[in-house]
């Protein structure tokens, strides 16, 4: 069995080992390539302050690039008896380079090492999510423009209310995503700060150049106060979880609408046959299982902030092992959200709509407000117009005029999709993802 980085002259009881390590070896595979990147930046800085020789740095960097390549190919393994990713990387370096491999931990702790791993991992996941949100956004805007003139009933209290349109329906979810992207950008900016150099939470007596590691890793800035850097563990995950939850909330609502509108009682939208599932007993069924699963998965994701909060709640200043458990709910959540984004965009692209919904007289009453407004515009007091139209409906005298003309910003006749697209583009431009990608590329080249 491999020894621990912290082990002295005794071994931990096997049951204690099993319980305390938990799922860390499994979870740390998410972090492996980022642990290598953090180590590359750290040892480059160590060489600049005289704690590593130039030749040592080059050999260590070459070995770390090989380990990073293993991670990217999915061949990196945390061996049985090795506690975590940090221990595995150091073990591999020591096997290859001897005592030189033991020098890479100078000036840091596993506390700031896992912090930087989590931040590097999370910011890359946030970029992937931003890309997925933009893809779904583009599909929704395209559908909104395609069906901008197709009317549908709008509902309040699940009762027919006023005329709406597919342009409005698809576009509403697009604008919701544009707002969600603001949360995502805030989460990214709080994530993209360098904790390296905080060590176990109280800094180091080595003259560490934290500005250098900030620059090498492409962080916007650093977590300056070393105590706060450690206090940020859990807080970062909670903030990111809230950003993910708001995107999930938009998709869950869209999924519910899609299931409802796809049902035979509505038949407003049609899902492609290949995107539905059947029944083992009812041969006519074409079930919207994908949207139902998206709804459930997104509702689960909306619980993530509370899960993180309850794990870290009321912890005082400093590191505690409780924080390890956050990994188990946090790290896998990104793949689930990205999968939901992909599937939603895929089906929205292939969805078609019924262009003749309002031919059915069932929906004629939704044009009552149009008639009230016509009478009011002609000079009748609004309340009198409201009463007249109401009495006409009750008496069966109301005739719907379906030639409506809405012109104000954001209405059926003026969707403002170009302005909504500009909002999205401005937010996306504010992430500055290029700093991250260029820095990582430079470390690996």
Image (tube, rainbow, N blue to C red):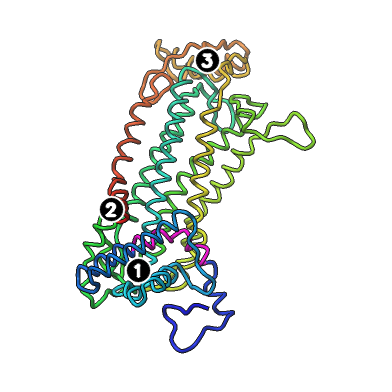
Tell whether position 27 is magenta.
yes
Which residue shows up at 67% across the image and 26% down it? 264
Give 320 or 179, whichever is nearer the viewer: 320
Q: Residue furthest bottom?
A: 9
Q: Is residue 293 above or below residue 96?
A: above
What main secondary structure does the magenta stretch of the protein show?
helix
Task: Determine the CA span between mark 3 and mark 1.
Answer: 72 Å
Tell whether position 120 is magenta.
no
| Residue at the disc numbered 1 | 112
Task: Determine the CA span between mark 3 and mark 2.
Answer: 73 Å
Task: Say what secondary structure mark 2 lies in.
Answer: helix
Residue 134 location, x and y as percent? 41, 37
Q: Which mark is residue 442?
A: 2
Instruction: For label 3, count other residues whose C-alpha is less than 10 Å away and answer few (under 14), some (14-19) or many (20+).
Output: some
Task: Say what secondary structure mark 1 lies in.
Answer: helix
**Contact, mark 3 vs mark 2 (Cβ under 8 Å):** no
Q: Which of pointers 3 and 2 lies earlier in the amino acid sequence?
A: 3
* Viewer-nearest of discs 3 and 2: 2
Whether residue 364 can be seen here: no
User: Is residue 156 shown left or right of residue 407?
Assistant: right
Residue 58 location, x and y as percent? 28, 65
User: To which quarter of the image does residue 36 belong?
Assistant: bottom left
Q: Which of pointers 3 and 1 lies earlier in the amino acid sequence?
A: 1
The boundaries of the magenta stretch are: 24-38
Give 288 or 339, whichever is nearer the viewer: 339
User: To which quarter of the image does residue 282 belong?
Assistant: top right
Give 350 or 444, whichever is nearer the viewer: 444
């Amino acid at each position: 069995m491999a020894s621990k980085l912290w082990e002295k002259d005794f071994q931990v009881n096997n049951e204690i080992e099993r319980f305390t390590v938990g799922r860390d070896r499994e979870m740390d595979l998410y972090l492996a390539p980022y642990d290598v990147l953090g180590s590359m930046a750290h040892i480059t800085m160590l060489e600049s302050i005289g704690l590593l020789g130039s030749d040592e740095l080059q050999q260590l960097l070459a070995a770390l690039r090989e380990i990073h390549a293993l991670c990217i190919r999915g061949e990196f393994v945390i061996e049985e008896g090795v506690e975590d990713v940090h221990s595995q990387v150091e073990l591999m370096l020591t096997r290859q380079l001897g005592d030189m491999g033991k020098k890479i931990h100078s000036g840091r702790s596993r506390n700031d090492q896992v912090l930087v791993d989590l931040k590097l991992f999370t910011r890359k996941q946030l970029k992937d999510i931003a890309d997925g949100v933009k893809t779904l956004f583009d599909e929704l805007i395209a559908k909104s423009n395609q069906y901008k003139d197709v009317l549908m009933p709008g509902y309040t209290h699940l009762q027919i209310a006023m005329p709406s349109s597919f342009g409005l329906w698809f576009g509403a979810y697009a604008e919701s995503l544009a707002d969600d992207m603001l949360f995502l950008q805030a989460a990214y900016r709080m994530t993209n700060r360098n904790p390296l150099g905080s060590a176990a939470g109280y800094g180091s007596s080595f003259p560490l150049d934290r500005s250098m590691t900030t620059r090498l890793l492409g962080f916007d800035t650093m977590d300056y106060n070393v105590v706060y850097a450690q206090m940020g563990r859990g807080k970062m995950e909670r903030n990111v979880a809230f950003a993910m939850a708001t995107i999930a909330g938009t998709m869950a609502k869209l999924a519910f609408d899609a299931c409802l509108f796809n049902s035979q009682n509505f038949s407003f939208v049609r899902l492609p046959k290949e995107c539905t599932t059947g029944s083992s007993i009812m041969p006519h069924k074409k079930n919207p299982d994908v949207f139902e699963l998206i709804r459930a998965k997104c509702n689960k994701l909306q619980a993530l902030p509370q899960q993180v909060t309850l794990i870290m709640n009321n912890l005082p200043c400093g590191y505690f092992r409780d924080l390890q458990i956050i990994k188990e709910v946090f790290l896998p959540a990104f793949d689930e959200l990205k999968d939901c984004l992909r599937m939603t965009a895929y089906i929205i692209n292939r969805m078609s709509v019924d262009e003749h919904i309002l031919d059915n007289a069932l929906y004629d009453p939704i044009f009552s407000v149009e008639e009230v407004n016509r009478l009011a515009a002609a000079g009748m007091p609004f309340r009198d117009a409201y009463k007249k139209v109401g009495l006409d409906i009750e008496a069966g005298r109301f005739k719907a005029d379906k030639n409506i003309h809405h012109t104000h910003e954001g209405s059926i006749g003026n969707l403002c999709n170009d302005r909504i697209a500009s909002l999205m583009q401005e937010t996306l431009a504010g992430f500055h993802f290029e700093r991250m990608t260029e820095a990582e590329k430079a470390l690996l080249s």
